């Protein structure tokens, strides 16, 4: 019985830690459902901070943006913080045109996102 108590405490500590979800490739209509599944699993753990590492994302379309918006809304609903990190130069304009650079907290890299308060 004591062992399960320890496991529970470890789980609780881990759940409170920041979580980083790396994405890569092109996030479009065909890939968005898999990204949704991945982000929903991350959100379900209710991390205090959820950082999406976009360093290896070469393209994102409106369906990908919608997935990120939905994840951000879910995190904010339970009081967590959501951030994007490492947007490539060719991906940044997509966020700027949609004015989502004013909606998302965007950091140059994961370390910067994790060190925010």
Image (tube, grey):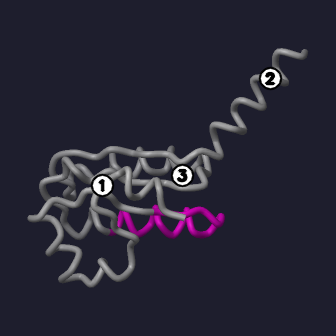
Q: Are marks 2 and 1 in contact (CB under 8 Å)?
A: no
Q: Which residue is mark 2?
A: 6
Q: Earlier in the sequence, mark 2 or mark 1?
A: 2
The mark found on residue 109 in the picture is 1
Residue 40 position in % (x across, y down): 49, 50
The part of the chain drawn in magenta is 66-82
Magenta region includes residue 94: no
Residue occupying the point 43% across, 54% down: 51
The mark found on residue 94 in the picture is none
Q: Secondary structure at mark 2?
A: helix
Q: Earlier in the sequence, mark 3 or mark 1?
A: 3
Q: Of discs 3 and 1, which sits in the foreground?
A: 1
The reply, left or right, for residue 65 in relation to residue 104 is left
Q: Relative to 1, is 56 above or below?
A: below
Q: Alpha carbon of mark 3 to alpha carbon of mark 1: how far?
A: 20 Å
Residue 102 position in % (x across, y down): 34, 82
């Amino acid at each position: 019985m004591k062992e399960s108590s320890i496991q529970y405490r470890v789980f609780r500590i881990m759940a409170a830690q920041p979580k980083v979800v790396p994405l890569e490739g092109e996030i479009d209509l065909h890939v968005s459902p898999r990204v949704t599944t991945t982000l929903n699993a991350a959100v379900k753990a209710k991390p205090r901070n959820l950082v999406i590492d976009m360093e290896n994302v070469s393209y994102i379309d409106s369906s990908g943006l919608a997935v990120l918006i939905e994840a951000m809304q879910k995190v904010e609903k339970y009081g967590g913080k959501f951030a994007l990190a490492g947007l490539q130069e060719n991906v940044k304009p997509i966020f700027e045109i949609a004015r989502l650079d004013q909606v998302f907290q965007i950091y140059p890299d994961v370390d910067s996102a994790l060190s925010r308060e």
